[in-house]
Amino acid sequence: MQYDFAIIGAGIVGAASSLELIRRRPGARILLLEKEAAVARHQSGHNSGVVHAGVYYEPGSLKARFCRAGVRDTREFCRENGIPFRTTGKLIVATGEAELPRLDALHERCRLNGLSPRTVDCRELRELEPNITGIRAIRVAESAITDYPAITDSMVRQFTGRGGETRFGTTVEGIEEGANGVRLRLGGEAVDAGRLLVCGGLMADRLARLQGLRIDWRTVPFRGEYFRLGPEWNDVVRHLVYPVPDPALPFLGVHLTPQVDGTVTVGPNAVPGWKREGYGKFAFSLRDTLEMLRFPGWWKLTGRHAGTGLQELWHSAWKRGYLERVRRYCPKVGLDDLLPHPAGVRAQAVARDGTMIHDFLVERTARSLHVGNAPSPAATSALPIARHLCDLFLND
């Protein structure tokens, strides 16, 4: 069959891009392919639900630019489509003197990214959040929470409502680019498209190599484990409450997050994922693990951050160690209060030299565009990312 455009991946970035593309090209034949049975089955449906304001990102980076636009766009999309969106604000809490220089640096980064952060002393922190302990904090008013699977589902329904086609449960087994388009092999069937957009998430590097692209990075999975608090803790915090993160790592630490359903989650940590799309505690894939271990960048990355990695693994294995990370700023939480909650797996692009790629990464050919890295805040920023991708996709 012949299509004008094909998109691989019905996570939130693929869904937003499909909707943006059909808005720009009404009447075009556009096909959205997804190997799972429904939308948002991986990163888009296994995250904390936070709408990030743009606190952490390098000023001037695509992440920073997209995040600021994404807060506004996500809020408006939710309002128009009846999806929960609650502006809670965020508190980043320092619990020791050693964290204050990093907290001050985050305050300045907020300012450079167009936010209006406010420093909160320990007395005001106690007034804002009686269950939280710290010596100083930053309050960022713009941070919020929402339901990303509901957003993704709404985008795809609007895409099909405008004439777009979807195929779920369909795995792409081959990608061949020619002078006039791209041929996709889907089992025993071939589909032709004039152009291809790939939003592969945890499979981004495999899909790029499936097409024959020579890339010097790989997708490395990091497992993020969460707990939830029991219903008696639903009012433990009103804000999102975060620790001061390590600036060398793209992970923000174990935080308390009120959810749109009224519950509160705790997490995530960041440990190696031994299965790219495995969410059980002992999920393992021989193929995924061997592929990761054969990549030189993985060994260089783990060697560089060996101390942090071992600490994360220890806290994953020892629930009380995980608890102590929470009790640093919320001492009332006890071991029995940490209840099971689904884990997530984050796709992190890593270069051959072991460097984590922190910003968005796109690989292009004459007829295709691959999203190689769409790190947090990709869910927050899905709509501006989609506009950017469609600009690249249509204007070259």
Image (tube, rainbow, N blue to C red):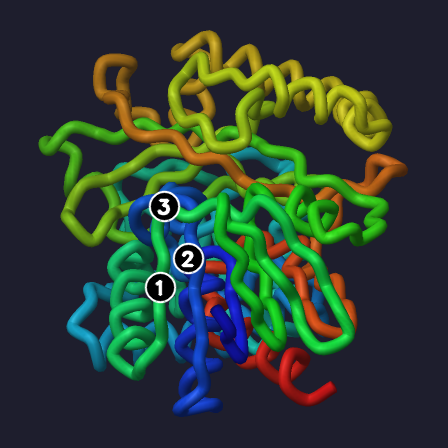
| First along the sequence among labels 2 and 1 | 2
Q: Position of residue 193 (x, y in %)?
A: 57, 71
Secondary structure found at label 1: strand
- Residue 64 visible within the image: yes
Q: Which residue is drawn at the image coordinates 89% and 37% (left, top)? A: 353
The reply to whether the C-beta atoms of the residues labelled 2 and 1 are less than 8 Å apart is: yes
Q: Position of residue 59 (x, y in %)?
A: 70, 69
On screen, residue 73 versus residue 171, left or right, reads left
User: In this view of the protein, which residue sits in the foreground, 190 or 175?
Assistant: 190
On screen, residue 95 versus residue 288, left or right, reads left
Per the model, the C-alpha gap separating discs 2 and 1 is: 9 Å
Q: Position of residue 197 (x, y in %)?
A: 59, 67
What label does residue 10 carry, if any?
2
| Quarter of the figure with residue 20 | bottom left
- Residue corresponding to mark 1: 166
On screen, residue 388 versus residue 59, left or right, reads left
| Quarter of the figure with residue 63 | bottom right
Tell me if mark 1 has few (under 14), some (14-19) or many (20+) residues whose alpha carbon lies within 10 angstroms of its own: some
Amino acid carrying label 1: it is Thr
Amino acid carrying label 2: it is Ala
The reply to whether the C-beta atoms of the residues labelled 1 and 3 are less than 8 Å apart is: no
- Residue corresponding to mark 3: 169
- Residue 377 visible within the image: no
The reply to whether the C-beta atoms of the residues labelled 3 and 2 are less than 8 Å apart is: no
Amino acid carrying label 3: it is Gly
Q: Which residue is drawn at the image coordinates 51% and 29% (left, top)? A: 223
On screen, residue 146 versus residue 287, left or right, reads left
Q: Which residue is drawn at the image coordinates 29% and 74% (left, top)? A: 160
Q: Does 206 appear above or below 231?
A: below
Secondary structure found at label 3: loop
